[in-house]
Image (cartoon, rainbow, N blue to C red):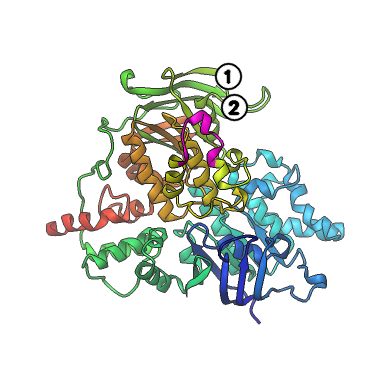
């Protein structure tokens, strides 16, 4: 008997022009690890929520959906059978401490105290949470919060685990740790896992099969390597989401470079094997930071924490020197001597771990918070625009169109500019939809469109690609270049290293309360071991200075004559 099965299943939201899921026929076998992919708005979240009756959206259903608890009273699922982990770590945490959060679900099931303590002891040991069992939940990092959500779901001993983009707000290292934990849950405990993700680098290699949804229809259902080949051929728009080693190999094959064998590399190790077969001896090309149009900046600067790099004051739009900040007089300092200079007309990316102070630094730069010590200098009369990490903070109206019309008097724009913004961010046709009924990526695009209509000169963006699909990220990177050409300056906090490698001119790494380095994009990512792209890891020591898969064919062609 399958864990979940859909038979000609369709679902439509109230007043929607088309179904969110249409004629879906699909069976998920028990113990499988199934990856659900697709562009924003393709139906991934709807699919997962339909599998959890307590979270199922209101709307019209057709066909049949069979769940592990289909025979339960009143058609409701047992909370211990189907577990659900959402995108935002804070949305699921309800208690004040880790210990109470783990016990909450078990207590609500009415289990005896000895059973509760036994289950908690097991799950804490499984996830290595012993050291922070007594901590307050609001003091946890984003990665710890999401791990707690996973543990709180699994302590109920479910047979089906649903995860809706659970790493969207995690830094690369925390995301990798979280997904490794999910893989252990599947391999060691036999729990059926259905995971919706835009980040395929870590998920596609460990999945048993992958599904591609397009406009609510199932377009592809195949094992990982076959899935990658089919997507690359049939869905070129979505191909940008594939792991970098697979994209690089497929790009080379389509460029006429013969593959060494029939295996398609899906991770860095396989990608390096693939490259070594094409390059019998190590080769190198000169590092070049001009792959994408960018202002002509000087060579990379580095500076110790607490000291700003030497930058000409004439070109500095925003600077911070020796910033110290904490949220309470008895709390530890979040920032300790952080310094940063932002040049006029650049795209400046700030990276670092969850809980490292990146969002705090952004709020200090825009004036929403005041430093306990240090100074911030901004160019006079510079209009700022802040996109917070939660797009819902900017979404206050009952429809997409009303959101974009809300600030017309302040921004002095009309319907023409609104229509242009709808087309620019792919929101056409959603004008009457309530913003909270949009997918996470669509909400992010709507919030950014609303902000851009106000025409700020300096944009401060906190995780601007959160929830966005790969094509939308590439389009956003192009938008950033257009905004640069219009004279705007952008500062973004991001965990998305490939987006930063594609869009940024300079990057800063925040650690231990300070900016430990600021370097030109290519130098930054070519030096880092973890905060770098998969392509850089794959090519390191074989081809130098390569950050993105599309750079590989030309680099390989330049290197091969030297063999």
Give residue 372's mark: 1
Q: Name the one closer to the observer, 183 or 18.
A: 18
Region rendered in magenta = 404-415
37 with respect to 235 (left or right): right
Q: Are marks 1 and 2 in contact (CB under 8 Å)?
A: yes
- Quadrant position of the N terminus in the picture: bottom right
The residue at the far bottom in this view is 1
238 with respect to 163 (left or right): left
Helix or strand or loop: what does disc 2 sit on? loop
Give residue 453's mark: none
Image location (x, y in percent) of residue 434: 61, 50
The quadrant holding residue 556 is bottom left
Q: Residues within 10 Å of mark 1 (few under 14, many from 20)?
A: some
The quadrant holding residue 329 is top right
Is residue 353 in view? no
484 with respect to 428 (left or right): left
Look at mark 2 in the image and give the residue it sits on: 333
Q: In percent of the image, x 62 and y 65: which residue is there?
A: 12
Query: How many marks on residues?
Result: 2
Q: Name the one closer to the observer, 260 or 220.
A: 220
Q: Is residue 413 magenta?
A: yes
Q: Label 1 vs label 2: CA separation? A: 10 Å
Q: In percent of the image, x 59 and y 52: which residue is there?
A: 433
Helix or strand or loop: what does disc 1 sit on? loop
Precedes in sequence: disc 1 or disc 2: 2
Image location (x, y in percent) of residue 439: 56, 54
């Amino acid at each position: 008997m399958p864990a979940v099965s859909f038979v000609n299943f369709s679902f439509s939201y109230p007043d929607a022009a088309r179904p969110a899921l249409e004629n879906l026929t699909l069976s998920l076998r028990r113990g499988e690890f199934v990856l659900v992919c697709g562009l924003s708005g393709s139906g991934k979240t709807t699919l997962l929520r339909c599998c959890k009756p307590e979270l199922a959206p209101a709307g019209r259903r057709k066909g049949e959906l069979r769940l592990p608890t289909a025979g339960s009273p009143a058609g409701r699922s047992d909370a211990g059978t189907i577990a659900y982990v959402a995108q935002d770590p804070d949305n699921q945490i309800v208690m004040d401490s880790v210990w109470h959060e783990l016990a909450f679900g078990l207590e609500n099931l009415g289990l005896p105290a000895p059973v509760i303590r036994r289950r908690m002891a097991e799950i804490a040991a499984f996830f290595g949470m012993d050291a922070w069992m007594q901590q307050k939940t609001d003091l946890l990092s984003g990665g710890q919060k999401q791990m707690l959500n996973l543990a709180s779901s699994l302590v109920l001993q479910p047979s089906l685990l649903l995860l809706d983009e659970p790493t969207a707000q995690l830094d690369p290292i925390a995301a990798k740790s979280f997904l490794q934990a999910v893989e252990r849950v599947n391999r060691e405990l036999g729990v059926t896992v259905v995971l919706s993700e835009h980040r395929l680098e870590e998920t596609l290699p460990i999945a048993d099969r992958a599904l591609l949804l397009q406009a609510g229809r199932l377009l592809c259902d195949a094992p990982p390597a076959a899935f990658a080949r089919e997507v690359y051929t049939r869905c070129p728009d979505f191909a940008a989401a594939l792991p970098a080693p697979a994209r690089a190999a497929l790009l080379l094959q389509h460029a006429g470079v013969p593959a060494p064998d029939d295996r398609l590399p899906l991770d860095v190790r396989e990608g390096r094997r693939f490259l070594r077969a094409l390059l019998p001896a190590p080769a190198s090309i000169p590092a070049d930071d001009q792959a994408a149009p960018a202002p002509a900046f000087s060579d990379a600067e580095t500076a110790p924490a607490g000291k700003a790099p030497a930058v000409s004051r004439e070109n500095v739009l925003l600077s911070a020197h020796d910033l110290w900040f904490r949220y309470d007089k008895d709390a530890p300092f979040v920032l300790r001597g952080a310094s940063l200079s932002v040049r006029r007309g650049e795209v400046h990316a700030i990276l670092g771990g969850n809980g490292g102070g990146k969002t705090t630094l952004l709020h200090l730069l825009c004036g929403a918070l005041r430093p306990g010590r240090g100074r911030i200098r901004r160019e006079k009369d510079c209009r700022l625009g802040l996109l917070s990490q939660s797009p819902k903070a900017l979404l206050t109206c009952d429809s997409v169109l009303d959101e974009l019309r809300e600030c017309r008097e302040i921004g002095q724009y009309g319907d023409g500019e609104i229509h242009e913004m709808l087309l620019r961010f792919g929101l056409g046709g959603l004008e009457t939809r309530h913003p909270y009924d949009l997918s996470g990526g669509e909400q992010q695009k709507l919030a950014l469109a609303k902000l851009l209509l106000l025409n700020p000169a300096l944009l401060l963006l906190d995780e601007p690609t959160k929830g966005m699909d790969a094509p939308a990220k590439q389009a956003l990177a192009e938008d950033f270049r257009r905004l640069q050409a219009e004279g705007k300056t952008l500062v973004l906090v991001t965990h998305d290293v490939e987006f930063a490698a594609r869009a940024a001119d300079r990057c800063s790494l925040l650690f231990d309360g300070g900016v430990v380095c600021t370097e030109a994009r290519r130098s930054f990512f070519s030096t880092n071991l973890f905060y770098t792209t998969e392509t850089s890891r794959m090519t390191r020591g074989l081809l130098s200075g390569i950050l993105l898969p599309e750079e590989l064919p030309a680099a390989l062609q330049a290197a091969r004559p030297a063999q």
